[in-house]
Amino acid sequence: QAEADRVSDALRKAIEAREQQATRQPSPVEPPVERVEARPPVAQEPPARYGLTTDAAPGATRYTVLMLMGPGNKGIRRHNKTADPVLCTDSGCYVSNGATATAALMTHRKALGFGRTWGQRAGACQMSLTCVFRGVEAGGLPFHIQPVDMRVVRHDRREAQVVDGGSDCFLAAGRLGCRRPVRGTNYVIWLVPEKMAEAIGPALLEQALADGLPDSEQASLGAQRR
């Protein structure tokens, strides 16, 4: 009887154990937590934009000047429809070294004197109706500019203008445009902030001259819509 009681007790314990195991809910297994180290935010470079000169280049004092000059109608220009343009300002006269180099600043007397008139004349812009003057220093604003066509006997000094800043230039469809050209008798000028001219490169500067420094009002409206 004692042996029967021990077997019966063992069976009872086994049955209870199975019932407990069957009713016991398995605990959910949580996935291991992956440690992620905090990383500093990556600085995003702002897109290059060249808009209004008053916004893109506040306080700009150096400009690249693009000049389109009409031929004169006196003296040698009556038959030779070209020009030898230099740009005179309050500080002196600039002689171009092309679209890739800073123009040379000389005194009025040296730039327009006998030596250059019969020698190097307008530098890179000799015998040309278009000219790029890089690195023109405005100094304080406003300042005066006066295009001069170098002739042999008497230079053709064009209408002087008072300039109070840049020409409000922008890029649209891969072309340079300016909303505020400086227009005088028989010439037109764009003043492009020098930093902008450096960024876009000489090819676009020369292309603007090849296009004839067109009226940029329509291009301006298109750029604003985009």
Image: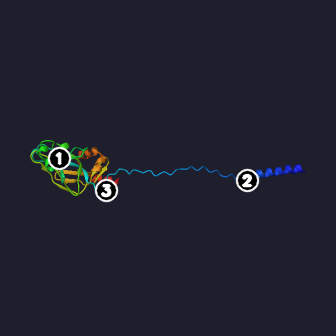
Q: Measure how far apart labels 2 and 1 are at the Cα level.
A: 102 Å
In the rendered structure, the answer to whether residue 78 lies left or right of residue 182 reads left
Choose mark 2 or mark 1, whichever is in front: 1
Dot 3 corresponds to which residue?
55
Choose mark 3 or mark 2, whichever is in front: 3
* Numbered disc 2: secondary structure: helix
Residue 37 in the image: x percent, y percent? 52, 50
**Rendered residue at 82%/50% (across/down):** 10
The crowding category of the residue bearing disc 2, from other C-alpha atoms within 10 Å (few below 14, some 14 to 19, many at least 20), is: few
Q: Which mark is residue 165?
A: none
Residue 19 in the image: x percent, y percent? 76, 52
In the image, residue 160 above or below residue 211 = below
Dot 2 corresponds to which residue?
23
**Rendered residue at 74%/51% (across/down):** 21
Residues at badges 1 and 3 in contact (C-beta under 8 Å)? no
- Sequence-wise first label, 2 or 1: 2
Residue 68 in the image: x percent, y percent? 20, 48
Dot 1 corresponds to which residue?
85
